[in-house]
Image (cartoon, helix red, strand yellow):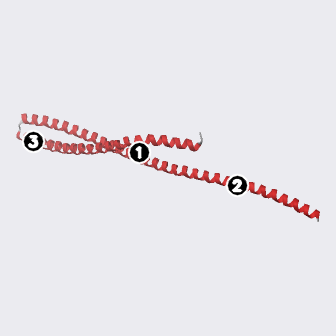
């Protein structure tokens, strides 16, 4: 197979593959954007929960201090249990927030990667257009070259005919000069 034909076939196969992948990539970009929005909402919710847990913990510590000062031992035990529960909730919410931040960063990376893929596909389409232009130029150059070759063959024939005519004229001249 000629190199130009091979390139053309490869470009067509590549175009078909990227055409199908481009539609899928568009859906993937949309999905990644939705994931980023959802992760942001979850992160805001987690931040709100952490702030609320810290307020609850501060309130329980105040109650504990008041109960210790008042000497209420049952309430002190109860306040300490509430504080342990509030700390556990706070740790869980902080862990959730950390996980949601990690998810958000991953989804942002995925979105950037998908957008890079989209840009790469645009570059491929541009390269394909340039390849088509180059192929058109090559075909035009080949047509011009074929025309130049025809003209050259005609010029060679004309020169050969002119040499033959020149030799003929020289013989006739030599014959005329002898006959005088």
Q: Earlier in the sequence, mark 3 or mark 1?
A: 3
Label 3 vs label 2: CA separation? 107 Å
Image quadrant where residue 148 sits: bottom right
Q: Earlier in the sequence, mark 2 or mark 1?
A: 1
Q: Position of 154 compared to 120: left or right?
A: right
On the image, the x and y values in percent for residue 48 come to 19, 45
Mark closer to the observer (3, 2): 2
On the image, the x and y values in percent for residue 99 come to 28, 39
Categorize mark 3 by other alpha carbons within 10 Å: few (<14), some (14-19), many (20+).
Answer: some
Label 3 vs label 1: CA separation? 57 Å
Q: In the rendered structure, find residue 63 and report the number of the disc placed on it.
A: 3
Q: Is residue 51 above or below residue 176?
A: above
Label 2 vs label 1: CA separation? 51 Å
Q: Earlier in the sequence, mark 3 or mark 2?
A: 3
Mark closer to the observer (3, 1): 1
Categorize mark 1 by other alpha carbons within 10 Å: few (<14), some (14-19), many (20+).
Answer: some
Q: Is residue 172 above or below residue 39?
A: below
Q: Which residue is mark 2?
A: 152
On the image, the x and y values in percent for residue 28 come to 34, 41
Position of the N terminus, as image quadrant, is top right
Name the residue rendered at 5%, 40% in the picture: 70
Q: Is residue 155 above or below residue 73?
A: below
Position of the C terminus, as image quadrant, is bottom right
Give the secondary structure at mark 3: helix
Categorize mark 2 by other alpha carbons within 10 Å: few (<14), some (14-19), many (20+).
Answer: few
Mark closer to the observer (2, 1): 2
Which residue appears farthest toward the bottom when viewing the image? Answer: 180
Name the residue rendered at 41%, 40% in the picture: 20
Give the secondary structure at mark 2: helix
Q: Which residue is mark 1?
A: 117
Q: In the rendered structure, find residue 21 and report the number of the disc placed on it.
A: none
């Amino acid at each position: 197979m000629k190199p130009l034909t091979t390139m053309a076939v490869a470009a067509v196969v590549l175009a078909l593959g990227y055409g199908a992948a481009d539609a899928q990539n568009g859906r993937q970009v949309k999905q990644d954007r939705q994931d980023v929005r959802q992760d942001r909402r979850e992160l805001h919710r987690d931040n709100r929960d952490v702030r609320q847990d810290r307020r609850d913990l501060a309130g329980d510590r105040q109650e504990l201090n008041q109960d210790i000062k008042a000497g209420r031992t049952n309430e002190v035990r109860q306040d300490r249990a509430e504080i342990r529960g509030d700390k556990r909730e706070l740790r869980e919410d902080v862990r959730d927030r950390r996980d949601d931040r990690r998810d958000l960063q991953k989804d942002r990376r995925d979105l950037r990667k998908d957008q890079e893929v989209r840009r790469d596909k645009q570059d491929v389409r541009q390269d394909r257009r340039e390849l088509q232009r180059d192929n058109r130029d090559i075909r035009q150059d080949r047509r011009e070259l074929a025309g130049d070759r025809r003209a050259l063959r005609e010029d060679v024939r004309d020169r050969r005919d002119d040499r033959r005519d020149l030799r003929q004229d020289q013989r006739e001249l030599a014959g005329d000069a002898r006959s005088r």
